[in-house]
């Protein structure tokens, strides 16, 4: 009989609590059979065998409207009698043809408990079944949508989960760190970069007429610093860092990331970044050994600038072949023994004109590592030496990792925080 009552209840819920009543004397019907009221409710059924076939479920009860009928007089009278005898208020009803019952929801308008009312109703010979108004719930996993970000594409950023970026962001998001991006231009109007681009300069002679020609630079900028919790797109690894764009490369074809630079454009961009005093520079590019460019990078490293480059084969010695440049590669393929390994396959990032797409390659790894280093710098010091950064990342590498160059962002941050705390305590002792 419980199945019958639940069927009755679910029918009421599905039909929004309609009753078929149209009499002026009928009780006021709630908009639904949920628990909007403060008073508890019970579900009661009566045998209902009308003399003629009832209309389809959901149609109006013509018996009460004067032009037909849905339930027997006996069931109707029994429902009224129960309401009066047990001091209940009828709030919804529906005859269910397939079970030959009349289903009624009553509200208990006083302080009696549901158990007390049901005990009395169970002794009434005209009541087929009486039970509490049960509540049902969906079975969606609420944890799947519980994230620290409101950015709608965050769940697709598997790299952030692998790197533990959400935990890292509880301590820092890279605020106060300036990052130089030497690449193609960047779509500075992308909604996920608003407020992240402090300055953009171009050293390319070719006139660029559309943001669509900035695919690679825009993708790298998004990986590093896409705005977090703006209800738009994705989350950058260092979403509060400031990017300064030094465009030295140009796209070869529409809708293709392939881009090139040359000695002249890169030299101008590097010199400008050096003059601007940028402490951290990303170069997601590769090419042959170049004495002029190497000299510029070496001069910047001596001034305390940290460079991150994309690992490549032996023929592409610049920039990662320059002593002091930090190399980044994907977890899937080892190109340099001293390169740090980062998730770099099928990583979601930005595209020009407000779009998003997936990107793979060591360019991606370099941009991600740049974002991670920005987090470390924001906790320690923006002038944190390159060798200190490298040592910190190596000493805190994930235990059991396939390579000692697989980073653990949160372990590195914890180490820096502990060192800072130790220094503060030592200074107090003095």
Image: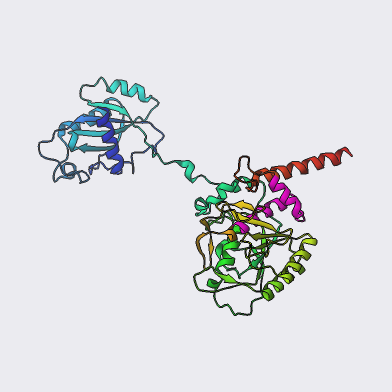
Q: Is residue 241 magenta?
A: no
Q: Quadrant of residue 420?
A: top right
Give the image's coloring scheme: rainbow
Q: Note whether 383 is above or below 248 in the view shown.
A: above
Q: Is residue 177 left or right of residue 85?
A: right
Query: Residue at horizontal 67%, vertical 64%?
Result: 317
Q: Position of residue 194 (x, y in %)?
A: 60, 63
Q: Is residue 378 magenta?
A: yes
Q: Position of residue 96 (x, y in %)?
A: 20, 37
- Does any portion of residue 79 appear in the rendered image? yes
Q: Position of residue 38 (x, y in %)?
A: 41, 34
Q: Quadrant of residue 182?
A: bottom right
Q: Is residue 121 left or right of residue 189?
A: left
Q: Position of residue 174 (x, y in %)?
A: 67, 54
Q: Residue furthest front?
A: 314
Q: How many marks?
A: 0
Q: Quadrant of residue 214?
A: bottom right
Q: Is residue 119 left or right of residue 254?
A: left
The answer to which of 173 and 8 lies nearer the viewer is: 173
Q: Is residue 345 left or right of residue 108?
A: right
Q: Residue furthest left?
A: 51
Q: Note whether 7 is above or below 353 in the view shown.
A: above
Query: Residue at horizontal 69%, vertical 47%?
Result: 394
The answer to which of 286 and 97 lies nearer the viewer is: 286
Query: Residue at horizontal 29%, vertical 43%?
Result: 14
Q: Which quarter of the figure is the N terminus placed in? A: top left
Q: Which quarter of the figure is the C terminus placed in? A: top right
- Does any portion of residue 238 appear in the rendered image? no
The answer to which of 247 and 16 lies nearer the viewer is: 247
Q: Which residues are magenta?
A: 365-394
Q: Main secondary structure of the magenta part?
A: helix
């Amino acid at each position: 009989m419980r199945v019958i009552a639940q069927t009755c209840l679910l029918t009421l819920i599905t039909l929004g609590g309609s009753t078929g009543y149209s009499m002026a004397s009928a009780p006021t019907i709630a908009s639904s059979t949920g628990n909007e009221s403060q008073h508890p409710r019970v579900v009661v059924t009566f045998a209902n065998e009308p003399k003629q076939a009832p209309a389809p479920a959901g149609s109006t009860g013509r018996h009460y409207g004067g032009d037909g009928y849905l339930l027997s007089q006996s069931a109707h009278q029994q429902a009224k009698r129960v309401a009066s005898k047990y001091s209940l208020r009828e709030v919804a009803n529906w005859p269910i043809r397939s079970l030959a019952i009349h289903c009624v929801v009553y509200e208990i308008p006083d302080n009696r408990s549901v158990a007390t009312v049901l005990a009395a109703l169970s002794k009434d010979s005209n009541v087929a079944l009486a039970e509490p108004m049960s509540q049902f719930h969906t079975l969606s996993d609420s944890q799947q949508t519980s994230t620290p970000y409101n950015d709608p594409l965050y769940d697709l950023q598997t790299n952030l989960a692998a790197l533990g970026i959400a935990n890292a962001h509880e301590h820092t998001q890279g605020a106060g760190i300036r990052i130089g991006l030497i690449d193609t231009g960047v779509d500075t109007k992308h909604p996920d970069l608003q407020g992240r681009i402090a300055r953009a300069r171009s050293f390319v002679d070719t006139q660029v007429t559309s943001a669509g020609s900035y695919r690679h630079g825009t993708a790298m900028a998004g990986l590093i610093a896409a705005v977090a919790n703006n209800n738009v797109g994705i989350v950058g690894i260092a979403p509060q860092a400031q990017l300064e764009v030094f465009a030295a490369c140009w796209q070869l074809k529409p809708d293709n990331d392939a881009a090139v630079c040359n000695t002249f454009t890169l030299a101008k961009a590097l010199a400008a970044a050096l003059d601007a005093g940028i402490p951290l520079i990303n170069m997601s590019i590769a090419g042959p050994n170049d004495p002029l460019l190497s000299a510029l990078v070496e001069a910047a490293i001596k001034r305390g600038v940290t460079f991150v480059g994309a690992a490549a084969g032996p023929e592409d010695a610049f920039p990662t072949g320059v002593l002091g440049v930090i190399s980044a590669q994907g977890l899937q393929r080892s190109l340099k023994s001293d390169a740090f390994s980062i998730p770099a396959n099928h990583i979601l990032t930005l595209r020009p004109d407000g779009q998003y797409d997936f990107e793979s390659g060591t360019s991606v790894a370099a941009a991600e590592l740049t974002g991670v280093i920005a987090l470390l710098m924001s906790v320690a010091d923006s002038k944190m030496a390159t060798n200190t950064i490298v040592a910190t990342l190596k000493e805190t590498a994930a235990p059991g990792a396939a390579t000692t160059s697989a980073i653990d962002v949160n372990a590195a941050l914890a180490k820096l925080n502990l060192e800072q705390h130790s220094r503060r305590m030592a200074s107090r002792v003095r």
